[in-house]
Amino acid sequence: MAVKVYKKNNAGRRKMSIVKPENLTDKKPEKSLLKPLKKKAGRSQGKISVRHRGGGAKRKYRVIDFKMRKVPTESRVEAIEKDPNRSALIALVVDNDGEKRYILATQGMKVGDKITVAEKGEISEGNRMMLKNIPVGTTVCNIEMVPGKGAQIVRSAGSSALLQAIDNGMAQLKLPSTEIRLVREDCYATIGQVSNFEHNIYRIGKAGRKRHMGRRPAVRGSAMNPVDHPHGGGEGTQPIGLKYPKTPWGKPALGVKTRKKKKASNKFIISRRKKKRR
């Protein structure tokens, strides 16, 4: 992993940098695993539901096999690629029967590696198996929450969970958010950490690069008039003048809990995530 800092040729390039992951393969994406991706621009039923979205470079969706339910199977890594739709790197693998699939790449995965998917297998990075057959204290990622549904949690770049215990048919996992949660022991997980952990240390450098990412300009609420935002008004740079921050529609923002108190899956959460100190 290397960070490339551009020469200071102009104002936009003065602080611009990009992350260049190692082991990337110089090839075009697998055509059979691409799908069209329709832009939504932050709109639901034609109305803006998420502000500051729209535009951006045209991209296609890479079909990722999150279920990996061909058990048992052994695959060979044919390519490591960047995916414009996610922070993690993806790996193109070829099964013994010749089928090609995209999966999430783990840290250190390279072309030529062999990975296996089985109920029980070798404890090696990139291999996938049931949680009950993974030793306690192992780092895992790409984890199922419901058997057969496919990986749903711990999928972003650099994330990993710690398998703390297995008891009464449930595996106890410490998630990246510090939440401790129970998952059924017959759910599948991949051993190791998700690749590209340094994905967010680059400097964007100029507004145009942000537009290429599909992000439109954002204006601070405190810079608006009172008619436009609860934080608006006042002479010069003023504090918001409220007990807590609000959205433009007057609802609490920043740190307020939005999870339903009677959510059915609350019984699987042993310890909620710790609040980060600012």
Image: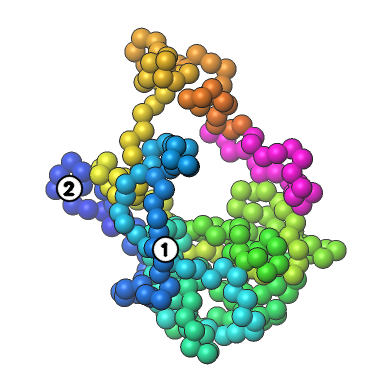
Outermost residue on the right side: it is 168
Q: Earlier in the sequence, mark 1 or mark 2?
A: 2
Residue 68 x/y as whole percent: 59, 74
Question: Label 2 sits on what residue type?
Answer: Lys
Q: Look at the image and tell me whether residue 126 can be seen.
A: yes
Q: Quadrant of the N terminus?
A: bottom left
Q: Look at the image and tell me whether residue 105 can be seen.
A: no
Question: Label 2: few (<14), some or many (≥20) within 10 Å?
Answer: few
* Residue displayed at 55% across by 64% down: 193
Q: Nearer the viewer, residue 250 or 76?
A: 250
Residue 198 x/y as whole percent: 43, 56
Question: Label 1 sits on what residue type?
Answer: Tyr
Q: How is the image coloured?
A: rainbow
Q: Which residues are magenta?
A: 257-278
Label annotation for residue 8? 2
Dominant SS of magenta comes to loop
- Which secondary structure, mark 1? strand
Q: Which residue is mark 1?
A: 61
Outermost residue on the bottom side: it is 97
- Which secondary structure, mark 2? loop
Outermost residue on the top side: it is 235
Q: How many marks?
A: 2
Give how far apart the Cα atoms at labels 1 and 2 are: 34 Å
